[in-house]
Image (spheres, rainbow, N blue to C red):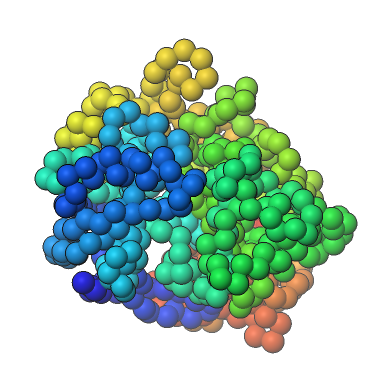
Amino acid sequence: MKISKLLFLISFIFFTGNIFSQIEGANLFSTNQVVSIELDFPQNDFWQQLEQNYEDMDINGSVYIPANLTLTDITGTYTFDSVGIRLKGNSSGMHPGDKKSFKIDFNRFVLDQNYDGLKKLNFSNGFKDPTFMREKLFFDLCRERGVPAPRANYASVTYNGQAWGFYTMIEQIDDQFLDWRIGDDDGNLFKAGSNFGGGDGEASLEYLGLDQSLYESSYELKSNEEVNDWYDLIDFIYFLNSSSDAEFESGLPSRLDIGRFLSSVAFNNLFSNLDTYTLSARNYYLYHNMSTDQWHWIKWDANETFGSYAFGVQTPMTNLSIDFYQGQRPLLERVFENDLFMSQYTSEICLLLNTVFNPTYLNAIIDNYKVLIQQYVYADNNKMYSNNEFDTNIESNLNTGPGPGGTIYGLKSFIETRFNYLSSVVDCNPFTSLSEYDPKQISVYPNPSANIIMIKGAIQYPMQYSLFGIDGKLIFEGQLNEINPQINLSGLSSNVYYLKLGNRSLKVFKKN
């Protein structure tokens, strides 16, 4: 049964104009909600089959079993015949009891079946997160800043009429995601670091040689599988490891979407999200955009943000330096050693501290999430933590036992402590979001402006730019070129905006 019923008009902004289009998945993700997922398995031994398929995944690959689905969201109730179901996850598989993370594949058994244009959905069981908020909060904030990340919402799930639990529902990183977020889906998409086919599984971006088999235990090609050509990834990794310092500085921006990558790294650092390239060297995607010949860094798996993944790290998670990483991480090592990129990265850290990563901004969002989900969390008898631990961990640390991992940082207490620490050790004066460029170097005119602003000065074209509201949320982004260095503000309300160019931000005044 194919259903594509979009009732929301989503504003998608591309370059300097506003293009209004409907984005697949808006029914599920455009509004914070708790979706009802009712799965009916025809097999009496469905749970044994799911568990066995999960245990045999390294041997047999992803094996799904069919189930009928009834899905209810804010637009209505929809039924689907024979969607595919399988268990998923690495560490989340250690969740006690039968409440495991799982995936729905709408067209596994029924060709072209989808919901609202989406073919797959992921459901995270809340492992190591008493609040059920870490992953959604992190992904929401990343997307608001223009960082490629999946959309997230919540779901209440039943198996054959039995309440199975409360889950975080996560968008699949696939061609649908690439279409709406990147604007291109023809290139190679790699999933990084999940021990594919054996080996240590670290996707460290270290150069291992030209033979692609040397990389297959650390990266998985998720598109163009029939062609199976990894040359572009190996060439990118070779550049990261073998270029001179001058070649690295001049060549990285043409190979990597550097602005969004630095924003992505900044979010990882602020939230002490270490189960990613920073420490575990996994849980990210790399996509090669064939339109721009650039690589895009895409977020994935953030249930252990707020310092919940700290293996081997002795420093308190609230006191990590902004250039923290561990192990052989050539991309981070070279970025942090480069004055230009480190300056841009520090600018992003400071901008986030001034706008979204602070108690004033985040505590209100957390309170709203609590209102939305508390009754569903309380009703989940299969969750990993108690109702009291849910309430406590929103506000303060939760002690679950001695030794490493025995403390789960509270959301609000972590934000306050981490914000205060970074504010004391990072000099944001040169990078404040209220700062201006030296007018001798660059200027914006007219300012204020009713429609078009022009940029002139010492700019290396083409130049990526991003426009943010005073709340730090991304409004749109694009690229300036030397022939027509202008930005269209028509359609925006009268207000103050921040235009990010390079490592500084300019105040832009919009008038009617």
The quadrant in which residue 115 appears is bottom left
Q: Is residue 7 left or right of residue 496?
A: left
Name the residue at 57% across, 56% down: 220
Residue 292, relative to residue 381: is it above or below?
A: below
Q: Is residue 240 left or right of residue 66?
A: right
Identify the image quadrant of the C terminus. bottom left
Q: Residue furthest bottom?
A: 483
Give residue 391's position: percent from left, percent from top.
Answer: 28, 28
Q: Is residue 201 left or right of residue 341?
A: left
Q: Is residue 489 left or right of residue 445?
A: left
Residue 121, relative to residue 137: is it above or below?
A: below
Residue nearest the viewer, comparing 508 with 50:
50
Name the residue at 62% across, 22% down: 314
Residue 417, relative to residue 367: is it above or below?
A: above
Identify the image quadrant of the N terminus. bottom left
Residue nearest the viewer, comparing 77 with 356:
77
Give residue 463's position: percent from left, percent from top.
Answer: 68, 72
Q: Residue furthest top?
A: 402
Name the residue at 62% across, 75% down: 290
Give residue 370's position: percent from left, percent from top.
Answer: 26, 39
Is residue 151 among the parts visible in the rendering? no
Name the residue at 16% across, 35% down: 379
Tally the numbered discs.
0
